[in-house]
Image (cartoon, rainbow, N blue to C red):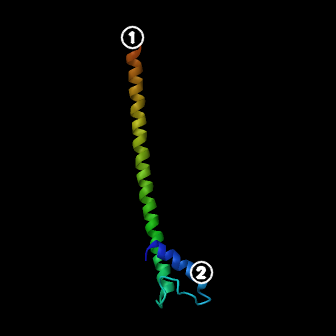
Amino acid sequence: MNNKDIMKALKCCSKYMDAGLCEECPLFGDENCGEKVLLDAAGAIEALEQQIEALEQQLNYGKEAMDVLVKENLVMEKKLAELGKGRAPCAG
């Protein structure tokens, strides 16, 4: 099941399980529907956690790269300032 179907099934279970009004559920007619929706929901949560972890790793890599660039920029600015010392202002 996709995430949309999982959410719909979970909502149906929470609303209709006691009333026996499961016809709206994507798993209607599956005698193991409760087990299936819980396993699919757990699988979806695990997949989302993996995606979050991968995005956090990318973010950390980006932060590290930015730190390197900032340090390089500071070194360049310092070198430029040293080059500019003692020079007469440009007349042009």
Location of the C terminus (image quadrant): top left
Q: What secondary structure is marked by label 1?
A: loop
Residue that numbered label 2 is attached to: 14
The percent coordinates of residue 13 (x first, y second) are: 56, 82
* Residue at horizontal 51 percent and vertical 83 percent from the top: 25
Could you tell which of marks 2 and 1 lies nearer the N-terminus? Answer: 2
Tags 2 and 1 touching, CB below 8 Å: no
The amino acid pointed to by label 1 is: Cys
Q: How many marks?
A: 2
Residue type at the position of mark 2: Ser
Q: Is residue 39 above or below residue 87?
A: below
Q: Is residue 46 above or below residue 31?
A: above
Q: Residues within 10 Å of mark 2 (few under 14, many from 20)?
A: few
Q: Quadrant of residue 79?
A: top left
Residue at the location (50% across, 79% down)? 38
Indicate which disc residue 54 carries. Answer: none
Q: Position of residue 56 (x, y in %)?
A: 45, 55
Foreground: 92 or 88? 92
Can you tell which quarter of the image residue 88 is in?
top left
Secondary element at image label 2: helix
- Give the CA distance from mark 2 to mark 1: 77 Å
Residue underneath mark 1: 90
Crowding at mark 1 (Cα within 10 Å: few <14, some 14-19, many 20+): few
Q: Quadrant of the N terminus?
A: bottom left
Q: Position of residue 76 (x, y in %)?
A: 38, 27
Query: Which residue: 56% across, 81% down?
Result: 12
Q: Position of residue 42 (x, y in %)?
A: 48, 74
Q: Left of 37 or right of it: where is 20?
A: right
